[in-house]
Image: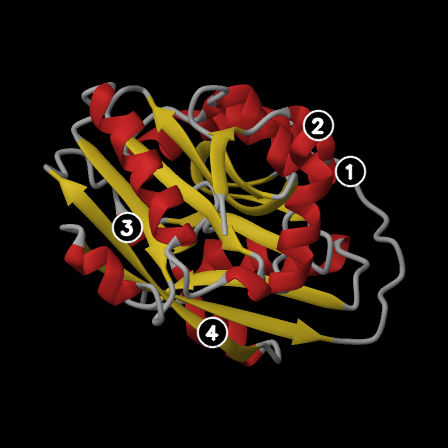
Amino acid sequence: MSVRFRLMTLGDIPAGMRLKDGAGWNQTAYDWERLLSASPDGCFVAECEGRVVGTSATIIYEERFAWIGMVIVDSHYRGQGIGTSLLERAIRQLDARAVPVIKLDATPQGKPLYEHLGFVTEYDVERWALTRAVAKPAVGTVLREIEDALPLDREVFGADRSALLRSIAAETPEFVLVARQEEAVNGYAFGRRGSRADQLGPWVARDEAAAATLLDEFLRRSVRQLVFIDCVRANPWAVPLAKARGFGFSRSLTRMFRGTNRFPGRPDLLGAILGPEFG
């Protein structure tokens, strides 16, 4: 079997969506576009007989650290080293850029491979899912306070990702939520309409009361039957708040890094990540 590796292009997005759907993931074509726009030289595909059978993608944040995501291989081609080759190409590209640390979210199956490549655990993430009756559209003001949330997001995430968050906010402005205490930003949340479910993230708060307000407002504005939250397991309020609203455990991930993690951000304020593809 001959496999060709090359850069991903916009024309490959339908193939990426096919692979993503086969894996049961929640990303949309817009998410692929965001990755390709941010890193046109850092997204890759594997081809076999002219058919895309695997992908990987990278995104660099402020030259502080980079992210690897969307490592997918067609189920009929697994076990042949294609995923490892795609991952190694992403790592080589980032090493060539002298990015000081590379991060990713590993599945339990992929974690041993990442450990072999020098990645170590930062913290655990759990996906929690809510299935409910389809909600009625919420009546309320759409908040457009994204600029107020961006300074806190840079502190919490560890780097500037304002361009990415502005893109997400432009697509789903009704999910941009900001909690305040005496005019100061006390928390914020964003949301996306994924291919399978609405997804909350990032979800950030300085206290449980603000976190609960943001979660409840997001659920009020979401009209999908299925909702996902990728909770930071060590956060004291994220999982309890989700469980109290009927969410059930879905899967576990491990946030890992390779290199010198000089900008870890503030995971103590982070209830839910943006997503495994973006960090």
Mark 4 surroundings within 10 Å by alpha-carbon count, few (fewer than 14), some (14 through 19), many (20 or more): few
Q: What residue sits right under mark 2 in the picture?
A: 11
Q: Residues within 10 Å of mark 1 (few under 14, many from 20)?
A: few
Which residue shows up at 75% across the image and 55% down it? 222
Q: Position of residue 211 (x, y in %)?
A: 48, 57
Q: Which residue is mark 4?
A: 251
Disc 2 on helix, strand or loop?
Answer: helix
Mark 4 element type: strand
Q: Amino acid at mark 3?
A: Pro
Give the image quarter of residue 213: bottom right
Residue underneath mark 1: 141
The answer for how far apart the CA atoms under marks 1 and 4 are is 34 Å
Q: CA distance from mark 3 to mark 2?
A: 36 Å
Between the C-alphas of marks 1 and 3, the distance is 30 Å
Residue at the image position 33 percent from the left and 35 percent from the top: 89
Q: CA distance from mark 2 to mark 1?
A: 37 Å
Q: Is residue 45 left or right of residue 21?
A: left
Whether residue 230 is situated above or below residue 30 in the rendered picture: below
Position of residue 35 measured from the top left corner of the image (x, y, whole percent): 53, 30
Sequence-wise, which precedes: disc 1 or disc 4? 1
Residue 267: image tag: 3
Q: For mark 1, give the secondary structure.
A: loop
